[in-house]
Image (cartoon, rainbow, N blue to C red):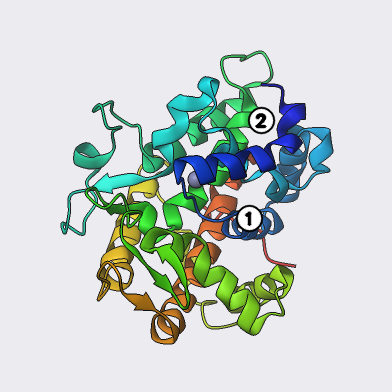
Amino acid sequence: MKMSSLGLLASMCMVLMLVAGVHCWSKEGHIMTCQIAQSLLKPEVDEVVRHLLPPYAKGDLSSLCVWPDQIRHWHKYQWTSPLHFIDTPDDACSFDYARDCHDPHGKEDMCVAGAVTNFTSQLLHYKEGTADRRYNMTEALLFLSHFMGDLHQPMHIGFTSDRGGNSIELRWFRHKSNLHHVWDREIILTAEKDYYEKDMTLLLQDIEANYTDGAWSDDTSSWTHCDDLDSCPSKYAAESIAIACKYGYKGVEPGVTLADDYFDSRMPIVMKRVAQGGVRLAMFLNRALGDDDGQEEGVASPT
Ligand SMILES: [Zn+2]
């Protein structure tokens, strides 16, 4: 597939989502994660990112952060389909890389934590120059950016038998939905409608205010603390399944109606996970593509 045809894929994705019942951290979740990340890139890394993006993206990483969802059922990219999530044993509420990070056929490393590690290590080759043609750096950038978002959506690290809540059908206020989709999209859309005049930019500004000098500003250095880029994705997966158990599945039975109580208590968690995904994506990109890959915090000061 030519990268220049990416722009035509949005409607195709909609069809696939309808036909296959596929759900993924909504486009809003991915766009916000990537916008946060790009705002925190070191200048020289932002330059590399812009260079890797196709021209029609106009330097905006977030415009292509949904691309991996749009191509996952294309023949050429079918192998990427298991990379969006992790199935963990029912009720275990834990993540164990050796036990859980594989596709349905048992192929190792084929899960979202393995994908983040894999595409990060591909990007590390960028500094070796363009002579290394084993990897498509543009695709590696888009996959890493997308999967870092999915890794932070708690229900993407869910139980095996209900496919991360996909088979738990319920009502979200007055319409039909399922538990996975509540966390992918419903909470974000309801927040936009109720509090932000349906304007994602206003919602994003609120999230940014929270981690720059608001409620989470003391936490961001712990979010980005990472001694080893290879193993940190497992830490993020463990956080996600812990949240999925404590807040996602908690008190939810098939057929239930979720409304104000669930929305009010879970919305701050969704917003925080979007922020964490963005801040950590910036840290990964800064360390993988930046001039020095030391152990520093790896996030540029917000401007
Ligand atoms: Zn996805």
- Within 8 Å: ligand 1 and the Cβ of disc 2? no
At label 2, the amino acid type is Thr
Q: State whether residue 185 appears in this view.
A: yes
Question: Residue 92's x, y, as percent?
Answer: 16, 56
Q: CA distance from mark 2 to mark 1?
A: 16 Å
**Looking at this view, is 298 or 140 the one in front?**
140
Query: Circle 2 sits in a helix, a strand or a loop, which is it?
Result: helix
- Check disc 1: other Cα within 10 Å, few if <14, some if 14-19, many if 20+: many
Residue visible at 33% across and 61% down? 239
At label 1, the amino acid type is Ala
Question: Residue 209's x, y, as percent?
Answer: 65, 78
- Mark 1, residue position: 37
- Mark 2, residue position: 138
Residue 128 against residue 16 in the figure, above or below: above
Answer left or right for 287 relative to 224: right
Residue 109 against residue 279 in the figure, above or below: above
Question: Residue 138's x, y, as percent?
Answer: 66, 30
Answer left or right for 100 relative to 234: left
Q: Quadrant of the N terminus?
A: top right
Q: Quadrant of the C terminus?
A: bottom right
Residue visible at 37% across and 63% down? 179
Residue 28 sits in quarter:
bottom right
Residue visible at 35% across and 59% down? 240
Query: Circle 1 sits in a helix, a strand or a loop, which is it?
Result: helix
Q: State whether residue 293 appears in this view.
A: no
Answer left or right for 201 relative to 188: right
Question: Residue 113's x, y, as percent?
Answer: 38, 43
Q: Earlier in the sequence, mark 2 or mark 1?
A: 1
